[in-house]
Amino acid sequence: QKEVEQDPGPLSVPEGAIVSLNCTYSNSAFQYFMWYRQYSRKGPELLMYTYSSGNKEDGRFTAQVDKSSKYISLFIRDSQPSDSATYLCAMRAQGAQKLVFGQGTRLTINP
Amino acid sequence: DAGVIQSPRHEVTEMGQEVTLRCKPISGHDYLFWYRQTMMRGLELLIYFNNNVPIDDSGMPEDRFSAKMPNASFSTLKIQPSEPRDSAVYFCASRLTSGRSYEQYFGPGTRLTVT
């Protein structure tokens, strides 16, 4: 079993829809949770970061962490065609340098 | 500011040949990471350095892979001999400990095809 599980999709939604992306994990030591966005033929770039449990909002993006369920989510409101990309969750333990990534979910927003 | 620089961007080689991938981290960053990305396995950490010293190479798939960081501004990942199953996109990333310590900055990647 992988430490981090993420549905690879693909996921296709109409412009303006609310998008929900999720990851589950098995390592209870994970404390730092991140979402990276990767456009085609580019390197991943950090989109959202959360420490421990709770919510974090940044514009149209909201990241949620539920440590009791070992479940993290990324919500995109008012989705735009420019949001079309692969979204990777990543996490690491306190004091660790290694990031463990999910498989990535390929998202397409249709105009 | 220049981000992480990788070269070449694309590499096509024949099985058995030596391949060398290059990375220049962001100036002043003290951590450097090498990743491999495939459709089947996703993004995997191969090795990382701190202040030019290899810290964890447990992700290196086998002895055919080696990585060096001779100075703070340059690192190489070498595959010798290369095999078709090494075909993937290889990313280099760097990080500054005293900055936003959770953020790794990725380069554009090198797309390697071994025929």
Image (cartoon, helix red, strand yellow):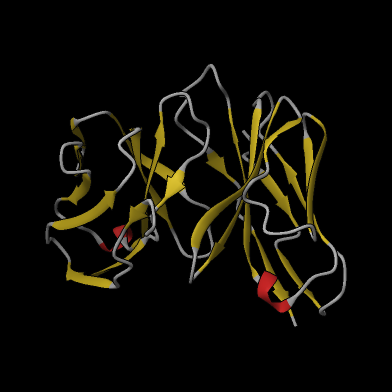
Q: Quadrant of the N terminus of chain A?
A: bottom left
Q: Position of residue B12 (x, y in %)?
A: 76, 75
Q: Which residue occupies 26% across, 51% down?
A: A24
Q: Position of residue B32 (x, y in %)?
A: 65, 36
- Residue extending farthest to the bottom is B115
Q: Quadrant of the C terminus of chain A?
A: bottom left
Q: Which residue occupies 80% across, 61% down?
A: B64
Q: Is residue B6 left or right of residue B19?
A: left
Seen in the picture, residue A70 relative to A107 is either above or below; the reply is above
Q: Which residue occupies 54% across, 39% down?
A: B105
Q: Answer whether residue A22 is visible to the viewer in this image.
A: yes
Q: Is residue B99 left or right of residue B69?
A: left
Quarter holding residue A78: bottom left
Q: Position of residue A83 (x, y in %)?
A: 30, 58
Q: Position of residue B62 (x, y in %)?
A: 73, 59
The one of B44 and A85 positioned closer to us in this rendering: B44
- Residue extending farthest to the front is A1
Quarter holding residue A28: top left
Q: How many marks?
A: 0
Q: Which residue occupies 82% across, 80% down?
A: B14
- Residue extending farthest to the left is A17
Q: Answer whether residue A111 is visible to the viewer in this image.
A: no
Q: Is residue A72 left or right of residue A40?
A: left
The one of A103 and A78 positioned closer to us in this rendering: A103
